[in-house]
């Protein structure tokens, strides 16, 4: 678990979090508008989402060693190539490959490996790895900026590439199992879902709960992603200074880690589906609070607590709930299929928010209320899904 935690810090930190700091340099090097550079990054997230299900299915069949090792190898090579891009076409080609690398090496493939290895303890293992991952921004924002200041952006990328090749790749090769099952172990039974009426079993892909959950997770991710880009302007519109707004934003990361610790210590005995009800409703509640707040004050600290903790807990819930509802036999494929649209929503969130802003006369205040409404609908969909009768596959989860 610790090995995967280290690789998650480096994987997220060297791609997802480093991008913000590298964006101006990439725009200057390629002569591209910053919006075009952001588009390359968004495309990589869409590709990561598109490959989630097939990557998960491959891990179900073959184990995670080859898949995650290939992801680290590709990530290292392409981060090195990113240092040499000179045109927008080269930029998009490299980020397309990085999307494949992220889809093969970040949370969702790691969760599939943990479910195979830890079996009854997979939820605690997922929580442990996400605790590591929660420090990716804390470590890599200052590290990347220090590398850029000391060495320049291109050399900084080469260092990030080396971390993937010299740390992540060996850890994946040495610590991730090569097989989906241990020698002599029978394959797990196929994934099925029990219809509400109690009739014959049917595949997960024909279970309406699966699609309701997918919609709920997609809406939840869309809201988080949309607000992330517009968060500082929202606070500035409420009378904060830039320094005050940045301080409130800096609280959200630690609150995500705090939420995961709460899940581990206090909520660990409850079903992930039940914990998810609380986490899902924290998002619309926090956004409604943000909408009514004005001027600097302690209410914004409470917002950061609710918002960050909800996001932190939801990362664990999204990783644990496929095993609870559908068993472990095809966890990778099921989790990947649920994660794909959610990752696409993460990529689309900033654009969707900008389109909403263009239509609203109420500005960022109106955007917050719209996002709160979407979050509430997503929470209601989630509750409707998890309150249906449990699938038969849960009996051997």
Image (cartoon, rainbow, N blue to C red):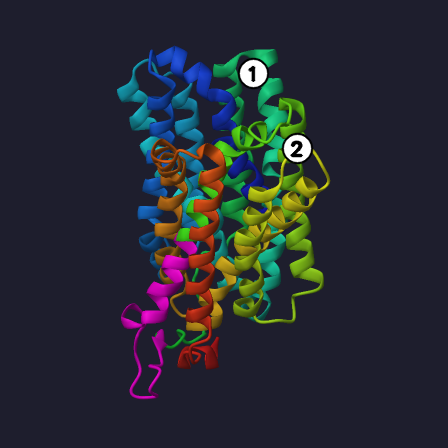
Percent x, y for residue 213?
Answer: 40, 63
The residue carrying pointer 2 sits among few (fewer than 14), some (14 to 19) or many (20 or more) residues within 10 Å by Cα, namely some
Q: Which residues are magenta?
A: 191-218
Taking the image as shown, residue 12 lies to the left or right of residue 344, namely right
Return the residue nearer the eye: 94 or 355. 355
Give the secondary structure at mark 1.
helix
As for residue 18 lying within the magenta part, the answer is: no
The residue carrying pointer 1 sits among few (fewer than 14), some (14 to 19) or many (20 or more) residues within 10 Å by Cα, namely some
Taking the image as shown, residue 207 lies to the left or right of residue 144, namely left
Return the residue nearer the eye: 209 or 79. 209
> Which is in the foreground here, disc 1 or disc 2?
2
Taking the image as shown, residue 250 lies to the left or right of residue 221, namely right
- Give the CA separation, mark 1 to mark 2: 35 Å
As for residue 195 lying within the magenta part, the answer is: yes
Let me know if residue 60 appears in the view. no
Q: How many marks?
A: 2
- Seen in the picture, residue 135 relative to 205 is either above or below; the reply is above
Residue at 58% of width from left, 62% of height from top? 278
Residue at 58% of width from left, 53% of height from top? 310
The quadrant of the picture occupied by the N terminus is bottom right
Q: Quadrant of residue 208?
A: bottom left
Residue beneath disc 2: 295
Residue beneath disc 1: 148
Let me know if residue 384 appears in the view. yes
Percent x, y for residue 376?
Answer: 47, 57
The first of marks 1 and 2 along the sequence is: 1
- Seen in the picture, residue 247 relative to 55 is either above or below; the reply is above
Percent x, y for residue 127?
Answer: 60, 56
**Cβ atoms at labels 1 and 2 below 8 Å apart:** no
């Amino acid at each position: 678990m610790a090995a995967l935690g280290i690789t998650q810090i480096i994987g997220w930190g060297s791609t997802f979090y480093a991008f913000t700091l590298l964006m101006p340099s990439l725009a200057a090097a390629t002569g591209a508008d910053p919006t075009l550079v952001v588009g390359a990054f968004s495309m990589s997230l869409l590709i990561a989402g598109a490959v989630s299900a097939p990557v998960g299915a491959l891990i179900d069949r073959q184990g995670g060693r080859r898949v995650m090792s290939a992801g680290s190898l590709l990530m290292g090579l392409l981060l090195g190539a990113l240092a040499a891009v000179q045109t927008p076409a080269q930029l998009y080609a490299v980020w397309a490959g990085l999307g494949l690398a992220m889809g093969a090496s970040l949370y969702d493939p790691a969760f599939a490996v943990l479910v195979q290895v830890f079996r009854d303890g997979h939820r605690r293992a997922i929580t442990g790895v996400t605790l590591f991952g929660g420090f990716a921004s804390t470590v890599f924002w200052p590290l990347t900026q220090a590398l850029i200041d000391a060495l320049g952006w291109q050399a900084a990328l080469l260092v990030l590439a080396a971390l993937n090749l010299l740390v992540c790749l060996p850890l994946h090769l040495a610590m991730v199992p090569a097989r989906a099952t241990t020698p002599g172990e029978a394959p797990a039974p196929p994934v099925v879902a029990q219809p509400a009426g109690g009739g014959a079993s049917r595949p997960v892909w024909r279970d309406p709960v699966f699609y309701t959950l997918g919609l709920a997770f997609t809406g939840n991710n869309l809201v988080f992603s949309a607000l992330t880009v517009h968060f500082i302007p929202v606070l500035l519109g409420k009378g904060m200074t830039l320094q005050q707004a940045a301080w409130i934003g800096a609280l959200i990361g630690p609150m995500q880690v705090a939420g995961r610790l709460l899940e581990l210590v206090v909520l660990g005995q409850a079903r992930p589906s039940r914990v998810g009800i609380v986490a899902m409703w924290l998002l619309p509640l926090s956004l409604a609070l943000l909408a009514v707040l004005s001027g600097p004050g302690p209410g914004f600290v409470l917002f950061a607590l609710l918002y960050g903790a909800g996001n932190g807990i939801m990362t664990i819930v999204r990783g644990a709930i496929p095993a609870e509802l559908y068993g472990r036999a095809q966890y990778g494929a099921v989790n990947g299929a649920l994660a794909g649209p959610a990752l696409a929503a993460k990529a689309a969130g900033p654009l969707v928010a900008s389109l909403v802003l263009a239509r609203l006369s109420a500005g960022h205040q109106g955007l917050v209320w719209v996002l709160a409404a979407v979050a509430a609908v997503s929470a209601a969909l989630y509750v409707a899904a998890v309150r249906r009768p449990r699938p038969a596959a849960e009996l051997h989860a």
